[in-house]
Amino acid sequence: MPADVAVETRALRKTYSSLKGRQVAVVGLDLDVPTGGVHGFLGPNGSGKTTTIRMLLGLIRPDSGSMSLFGHEVPKRLPEVIGRVGAIVESPKLFPAFSGRRNLVLLADAIGAPRSRVDEVLDETGLTDRAGDRYSSYSLGMKQRLAIAATLLKSPDLLIFDEPTNGLDPAGIHEIRRTMRRLADEGRTVLVSSHILAEVEQVADTVSIIGRGRLLASGTVADVIGDRTAAVRVGVAEPERAAAALHAAGLQVRPDGAHLLVEGEPAAARITYLLAQQGLWVHELTPVRAGLESVFLELTRADTLGAPDGASPSAPDGASPQPHAPAPPAAPSPPGPDDGTTPSRRTRGGAR
Amino acid sequence: MRLLGVEVRRLLARRMLLAAALAGVAAVVLITLGIWSSTRPLTQTQLDAAERAYQAEVERWEADGDEMLADCEEAEAAERDLTGDDVDFGCDQMEPQRQWFFPERPAFGDVAADVLATSSVLLLVLVLVVGVSATAAEISTGALGTWLTFVPQRLRVLASKLASAGVVALPLVAGLLVLLLAGLWVAHAVNGAAGGTDAEAWRDIAGTALRILALGALAGVVGAALGVLLRHTAAALGLLVGWALVVESIVAGLVPALQPWLLRTSVAAWVQDGTTYWTTECTVTADGTSCQGVEHHVSLTHGSLWLLALTVVLVLLTGAVFRRRDVV
């Protein structure tokens, strides 16, 4: 494993068995998280993000595949590297009847961290004043901050946050985002899983998108988004007639103030051609750049619709999942013929 | 040892331990009141009533005693002829005795060890609940998952959790035993029945208390292991209650040969330095079927080794399950 990779998984697979049958949660996942910066680990609910994180932390056992943290094979050598890893999996879970400070003291003692470190991390997360209160009396935001404080007890090189903003108010979300950025700027690696893309886009340097337990795309945010457009903003003299003409041609159109917004990945040339045919002259044609969310939606929607064998990882098994055949990163696609909307991104798993 | 220390401090800070201690104190107070009540001297009214009952029985004996004695001896002879055994109906002990109506109050030294042994069941139940809840609550709240992200060595974590439940049981049980003994002594002293406790009685009391203490530690470990295995306090306690009802009562009644292997027999053998149980053995002769109760002895060694073996099996099973289990 290269020295600049904090987390690596290869052909990782996990199936849950229950009375209802077997459910495949992760299917041959290849994941690389580079050292340093914030890495967004994105996917819809049930796509296998939390399962992957739990496997990395030794909480659940993979059926097959390999994983490593900073080059240490896990779970075999997890004890050697766990001191460099702080993690919050799903919601923060500490002892509810104990105060925030007592929770941290117990954890600090368990790993042999000095008691002074408890005061430091409480101060760092702004919880000093409430440290003596019972954890169960904390708001969700405070619980999240205390959990972050707990992870900082180790002075970790890698922080794993699983859906850290779930249930938080906007101020709490902003604070978590700021904290993640600060930690990354200190030289740590932050792996944050989320299904709320707008948040991650604001803070992540690199992302991996998974769907149904498989990697769909990964790379820097800019690479994944590419130079695709999500829509084209059209300024035209008679917007209502123009909308009808475009709609008749099969394009998705909606009003945007005095303008029209043609959604999807429309070719600008086609829009001008269609409108010109109607004697409508365009005075503005602005591509609206796609966000991570639209790329994410497109990838995950395509993954669902394009399931090659109908085997849904979340469906009760019997139906076997798609065999994993890791593909090398795809070469950047050439630009589209005339609209420049084809994305350039690294994809894996043959899902695209 | 560091992890054990952390776990012990965690358990000592739990409210469940405080609740168990308070429940134990309440039980000790009730037992002490019961003992105080039973050791009180008879009131004048009670003495008068006892005297009247004794006199009435003496009068009845004087009137009908010869006839009652003859009936008894006749029945005894008939039974002897029927079975061929040298049966004794105790006919020569039928004459009313004064002490039957004026019972002697038990002295502290005569009853303390027995009261401790009887109360041990309550202490064990408390310790089991503390042990079960210590681990099951941690699992059900998800705190165990967080803990494992700090200390991922599962067997080390499990060992610290089981051992800490045993360690924490010691001060709880010891405190309640001391309180109970003090309460017993005060109850007897108040009623003037505390004197005359000789060295042998004290040795008996100390031995019983120490064995209960050791059993308390074992119960803590067993409770914590059950909590890990079943993950829910209610499930673990339900299993214990179900075991007591089904195996220790119903199955044991149907299969008398299980008696020496029952938990209650082993616990009694350990706490009381050996115990006995009865079975009914029947023989078929030409005259019919004859059944009689037979007393069996279970030694302290048997009880202790069996309890230890069961605990070891449970701990090994828990280790095997916990090592591989997904923590979600």
Image: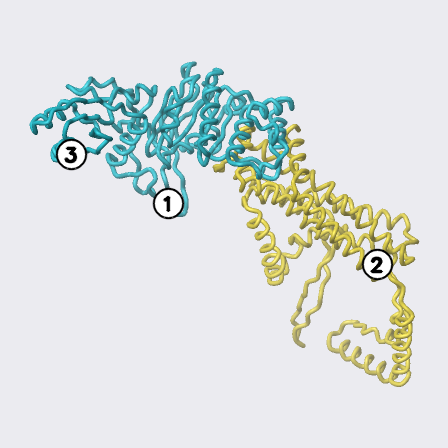
Chain colours: A cyan, B yellow
Is residue A291 among what the camera can see?
yes
The residue labelled by disc 1 is A21
In the displayed structure, would residue A299 be above or below residue B295? Answer: above
Mark 2 touches mark 1? (CB < 8 Å): no
Secondary structure under tag 3 reads helix
Amino acid on which the number 3 mark rests in the picture: Glu
Q: How far across and how far down the image is residue B252, in percent? A: 62, 59
Q: Disc number at residue B230?
A: none
The residue labelled by disc 2 is B36
Chain for disc number 1: A
In the displayed structure, would residue A240 be above or below residue A207? Answer: below
| Image side of residue A56 versus residue B77, left or right | left
**Mark before the other along the chain sequence, 3 or 1:** 1
The residue labelled by disc 3 is A240
- Calculate the distance from the C-alpha at mark 2 to the C-alpha at mark 3: 98 Å
| Image side of residue A246 versus residue A146, left or right | left
Chain for disc number 3: A
In the displayed structure, would residue A104 be above or below residue B212? Answer: above
Q: In the image shown, does A134 or B272 lie closer to the viewer?
A: A134
